[in-house]
């Protein structure tokens, strides 16, 4: 039966950097995710599990690899959405959560709200028994470089989208945000419809300059172009990124539709990404065009 899976590790790739470690990691994850889907695991469980692995790796600006804000504190954003039920959850500016994507999942499963932010998000996650970083200086990878805006230490927001063998779509996205950001700054990642979206048509996860993805409701715009404008997945994804670029932004997105079609466009220098489906063997790319 049809299935598909895509991962991204961020659209901030620099041609001067060596991404072999990230490529190898994403290759392992995409194969692991394929096995999960083939075993019958749901799209939602698969994307959350893979994003958690990316958060734990320290190879991307999410989870362990996140950058502190101007006050020296790591604030994290994450969003998840399950397409068939249209349920979603998000956390924004949550401090030092080990797995913000799991906190977002708990918000969704709790069901009383879609997003929690700041201290409220932290208190909720602690009440759910989730793990928090006790020694930030020892935990975060290259956090001093991140905080000083060392461009060479950037690795990128993470996300995953999937179609499972039952025809269900899901998306998950997680980030530590932009380097040296203002305290309380929230990007597109946890905003359902901007950085993360899934319905019965398509699942989308975005990466790039988040403010512009918010201004274009980018993730939902892909779905809207497909549902209302009858655009193909590739047409919708390309048109959405063109609007982001028109406003002055750049980045990329990953998307899979209910037929198992895949799109991984970007208008930045590169985007770390990997994909697999029942019709295509696993592939990992950074700078190669889609």
Image: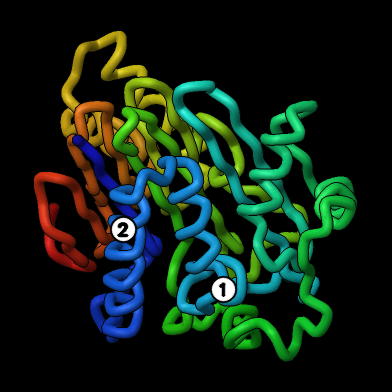
Instruction: Determine the residue located farthest toward the bottom in the rendered image.
Output: 138
Residue 133 falls in which quadrant of the image?
A: bottom right
Q: Is residue 69 left or right of residue 276?
A: right
Compared with residue 176, is residue 220 higher up or lower down, i.e. above or below? above
Q: CA distance from mark 1 to mark 2?
A: 20 Å
Residue 7 image position (x, y, % from top left): 34, 56
Q: Is residue 157 above or below residue 25?
A: above
Residue density around tag 1, few if under 14, some if 14–19, many if 20 or more, within 10 Å: some
Q: Position of residue 66 (x, y in %)?
A: 60, 71
Extreme residue toward the front, this view: 39
Left/right placement of residue 125 relative to residue 251 reads right
Circle 2 residue: 35
Display coloring? rainbow
> Of label 1 and label 2, which has the lower sequence position?
2
Residue 29: quadrant of the picture: bottom left
Give me the residue at 60% from left, 63% from top. Answer: 176
Q: Position of residue 117 (x, y in %)?
A: 78, 45
User: Residue placed at 19% from the left, 67% from the top?
Assistant: 287
Question: Which type of secondary structure does the marked residue at label 1 adopt?
Answer: helix
Question: Which structural element holds mark 2?
Answer: helix
Task: Give the crowd class for mark 2: few <14, some 14-19, many >=20 residues within 10 Å.
Answer: few
> Which residue is at a point 85% across and 47% down the rendered structure image?
124
Residue 224: mark in rendering: none
Quadrant that contains the N terminus: top left
Q: Can residue 212 be seen by looking at this rendering?
A: no
Q: Is residue 69 left or right of residue 6?
A: right
- Nearer the observer: mark 1 or 2; the answer is 2
Mark 1 and mark 2 residues within 8 Å of each other at the beta carbon: no
Find disc 1 in the rendering and name its residue: 56
């Amino acid at each position: 039966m049809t299935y598909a899976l895509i991962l991204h590790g961020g659209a901030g790739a620099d041609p001067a950097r060596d991404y072999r470690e990230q490529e190898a990691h994403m290759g392992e994850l995409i194969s692991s995710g394929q096995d999960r889907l083939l075993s019958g695991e749901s799209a939602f469980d698969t994307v959350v599990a893979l994003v958690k692995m990316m958060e734990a790796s320290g190879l991307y600006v999410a989870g362990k690899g996140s950058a502190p804000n101007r006050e020296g504190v790591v604030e994290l954003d994450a969003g998840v959405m399950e397409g068939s039920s249209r349920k979603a959850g998000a956390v924004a500016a949550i401090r030092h959560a080990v797995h913000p994507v799991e906190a977002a999942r708990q918000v969704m499963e709790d069901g009383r709200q879609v997003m929690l932010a700041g201290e409220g998000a932290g208190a909720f996650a602690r009440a759910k028994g989730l793990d928090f970083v006790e020694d930030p200086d020892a935990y975060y990878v290259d956090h001093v470089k991140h905080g000083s805006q060392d461009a060479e230490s950037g690795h990128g927001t993470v996300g995953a989208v999937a179609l499972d063998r039952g025809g269900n779509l899901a998306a998950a996205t997680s980030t530590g945000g932009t380097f040296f950001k203002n305290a309380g700054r929230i990007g597109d990642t946890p905003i359902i419809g901007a950085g993360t979206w899934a319905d019965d048509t398509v699942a989308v996860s975005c990466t790039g300059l988040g403010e512009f993805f918010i201004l274009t409701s980018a993730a939902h715009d892909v779905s809207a172009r497909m549902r209302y404008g009858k655009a193909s997945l590739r047409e919708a994804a390309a048109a959405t990124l063109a609007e982001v670029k028109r406003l002055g932004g750049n980045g990329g997105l990953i998307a899979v539709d209910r037929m198992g079609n895949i799109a991984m466009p970007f208008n930045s220098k590169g985007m770390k990404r990997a994909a697999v489906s029942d019709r295509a063997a696993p592939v990992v790319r950074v700078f190669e065009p889609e």
